[in-house]
Image: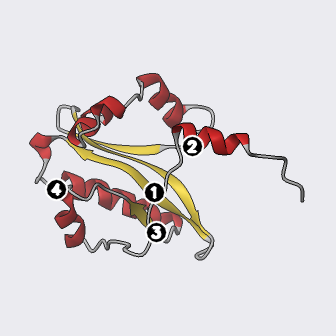
Amino acid sequence: MVHELAEFERAADSCHLTEEQLRTALFGEHPAVFGHVAVDADDAPYGFTLWFLNFSTWEGTHGVHLEDLYVRPHARGTGAGAALLATLAQVCVERGYKRLEWVMLDWNPAAEFYAAIGAEVVADWLPYRLSGAALTQLAERASPVRG
């Protein structure tokens, strides 16, 4: 379904995740990614979330960064997305996490859904990313940190 999400987001050629990579990330010795899968009465998957912990120095506690939320087209509008998000919100509340955050493409029609459940756009924070050559070039400038 991750590849289906990449296709939906018009970036199928950018998705290189393998089943082995996902299995290791979720179930390896030190899992760093967590997830939930929605299945129908026949155990056929129709939606998922993938998430990881972040940390707020201001709150002094972890939060959750929702990396992916995807519901297959035939299950959209059924409450599946809301149920997946509610499950993740429950994880946050039960563990004392103060935030559930995510980013999405500005054209995604899910914006209306997110607004309807009370999610707010964080307008004064801009996402930044280092990857590819820029990441490698910065890494090459690293020197030992002395304390």
Circle 4: is it few (<14), some (14-19), or many (20+) Cα within 10 Å? few
- Callout 1 secondary element: strand
Query: Farthest residue in the right direction?
Result: 147
Indicate the amino acid at tag 1. Answer: His
Q: Are marks 2 and 3 in contact (CB under 8 Å)?
A: no
For the point 47% across and 45% down, the residue is 34
- The CA distance from mark 1 to mark 4 is 21 Å
Q: Position of residue 25 (x, y in %)?
A: 52, 35
Could you give the CA–CA distance between mark 2 and mark 4, rounded to whole angstroms? 41 Å
Q: Considering depth in this image, is 69 or 97 the residue closer to the camera?
A: 69
- The residue that label 3 is drawn on is 99
Compare marks 3 and 1 and give the one earlier in the sequence.
1
Q: Nearer the viewer, mark 2 or mark 3?
A: 2
Choose the circle earlier in sequence order: 2 or 3: 3
In space, the residues marked 3 and 4 are separated at their CA atoms by: 22 Å
What kind of residue is marked 2? Ala
Earlier-in-chain disc, 2 versus 4: 4
- Where is mark 1, residue-wise? 65
The residue tagged 2 is 134
**The N terminus - image quarter:** top left
Q: Which residue is mark 4?
A: 79
Q: Secondary structure at mark 2?
A: helix
